[in-house]
Amino acid sequence: MRDDLQGLEISHNELQKLTNLPVNEELLIITNILLNFGKIYIQKLKGSEGATVIFIGFSTFVFSYILFDLILKIFVSWITIPSWIFLIILGLWVGGLTQIILYMLWKRRNKFVKLNMNNSLQILLNDVSRYNAIIKAIDINDQIEEAGNPEVVIKERESVIAALKLTKADLVRALKTERILRENKNFILSNTELFINNLATLTAMQVHEQATEHGRLLNEALQIALDVQH
């Protein structure tokens, strides 16, 4: 990703911090974590430090197995099955139990998000997804250009980047405002006379994006995304 795109994307952690909700949270799958760890290990094996990685990995495995076997013989000597079979069974049991706990936590957090979800927040989350998709599309377009296709160069790039920066600032401001209103909803509803003027001002500030220079530049950025996708 080019330097001018760095930091423009609204990351998952940033979005959760702005909303104070575990939005768009994916369920952690233990097998996926193990597969990713395996890929990293294989990549290191192919590198210059491959021999060192093999030695450390093998030594750790042997030491762990010997320690596990010793603990079994001392504390659960009544177990008659081989220690390596027991290790596999224990690993599957612990893995299954951990996955169930992760699923229950994920389900609980999703339920919490649904309870706090409202139409305004849903619209903002969709806007964030659209905004991040534009940045991803521009990044892909840059990669295509760097691969030897200068004809796909983005015209008025500085203007497009400026529009994206303005859009991010607007989205961040809107998310912060939505969070304040959502978290203080009961107080606002019980004291409407104190907030009616301010809420009217907020409503009046919502100008149509299409009628502004900001909207024109953002639409240009979106058009780039659509062109790349097709």
Image (tube, rainbow, N blue to C red):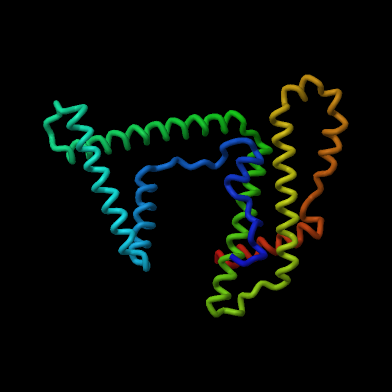
Does residue 164 appear left or right of residue 91 in this picture?
right
Quarter holding residue 197 = top right
Q: Residue at x 26, y 53 (%)?
A: 58
154 lies above or below 175: below
x%, y% of residue 50? 33, 64
Does residue 80 appear left or right of residue 6 in this picture?
left
Residue 166 vs residue 87, the one in the foreground: 87
122 lies above or below 51: above
Q: Which residue is drawn at 29% across and 49% down?
A: 60
x%, y% of residue 156? 73, 71
Does residue 103 appear left or right of residue 143 in this picture?
left
227 lies above or below 14: below
Residue 53 vs residue 212, the one in the foreground: 53
Q: Which residue is drawn at 34% across and 32% down?
A: 97
Looking at the rendered image, the quarter that the N terminus falls into is bottom right
Q: Residue at x 70, y 41 (%)?
A: 175
